[in-house]
């Protein structure tokens, strides 16, 4: 799903840590991008990702190599985030979406690609 950009409207630039957290995790308990009971405001989320996505990915890759945040899966890839770290790593590896540094990590520890039961693989 391509990132939609608003044409003719001033883009919001007051993104904060709650917006960043929502894009990283998909949690809306701060009421960001819509409340927990309703649909996401995907236009606003895409606008926020367009401005903060590179920074989020850079930090995410440093802290959680071979994984991607919710916003990347949902906004950039247009799909649901696979459940479990091992499923994410396997998908990213098979699709050729890992960075050279992440590939080196996988090569040094191939067990990172072994499927583990959901809930037991978030290392």
Image: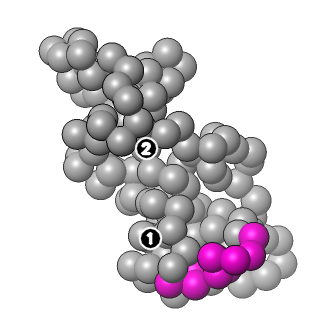
The residue shown at (41%, 36%) is: 118
- Looking at this view, is 20 or 116 the one in front? 116
- Locate residue 47 relative to residue 118 in the image: left or right: right
Mark 1 Cα-neighbour bin, 10 Å: few <14, some 14–19, many ≥20 = many
Mark 2 Cα-neighbour bin, 10 Å: few <14, some 14–19, many ≥20 = many
- Locate residue 113 relative to residue 40 in the image: left or right: left
Q: Is residue 21 visible?
A: yes
Residue placed furthest toward the left: 108
Q: Position of residue 56 (x, y in %)?
A: 40, 58
Q: Which residue is mark 2?
A: 68
- Locate residue 25 relative to residue 106 in the image: left or right: right
The residue shown at (33%, 17%) is: 114
Label located before the other in sequence (2 or 1): 1
Q: Is disc 2 placed on a helix, strand or loop?
A: loop
Check residue 4 for magenta coloring: no
Q: Main secondary structure of the magenta part?
A: loop
Q: Is residue 100 visible?
A: no
The N terminus, quarter of image:
top right
The residue shown at (30%, 35%) is: 121
The residue shown at (76%, 59%) is: 4
- Looking at this view, is 20 or 83 the one in front? 83
Instruction: Please state the extent of the stretch shown in magenta in the rendering.
Output: 30-39
Colour scheme employed for the rendering of this structure? one colour
Q: Is residue 67 above or below residue 17?
A: above
Q: Position of residue 78 (x, y in %)?
A: 69, 44
Q: Which mark is residue 20?
A: 1
Residue 65 found in image quarter: top left
Q: Is residue 123 above or below residue 100?
A: below
Check residue 38 for magenta coloring: yes
């Amino acid at each position: 799903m391509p990132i939609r950009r608003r044409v003719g409207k001033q883009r919001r630039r007051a993104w904060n840590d709650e917006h960043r957290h929502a894009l990283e995790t998909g949690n809306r308990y701060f009421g960001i991008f819509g409340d927990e009971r309703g649909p996401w405001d995907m236009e606003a989320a895409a606008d926020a990702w367009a401005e903060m996505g590179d920074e989020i990915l850079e930090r995410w890759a440093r802290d959680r190599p071979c994984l991607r945040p919710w916003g990347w899966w949902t906004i950039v890839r247009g799909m649901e985030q696979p459940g479990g770290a091992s499923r994410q790593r396997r998908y990213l590896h098979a699709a050729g979406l890992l960075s050279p540094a992440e590939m080196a990590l996988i090569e040094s520890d191939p067990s990172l690609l072994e499927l583990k039961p959901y809930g037991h693989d978030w290392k």
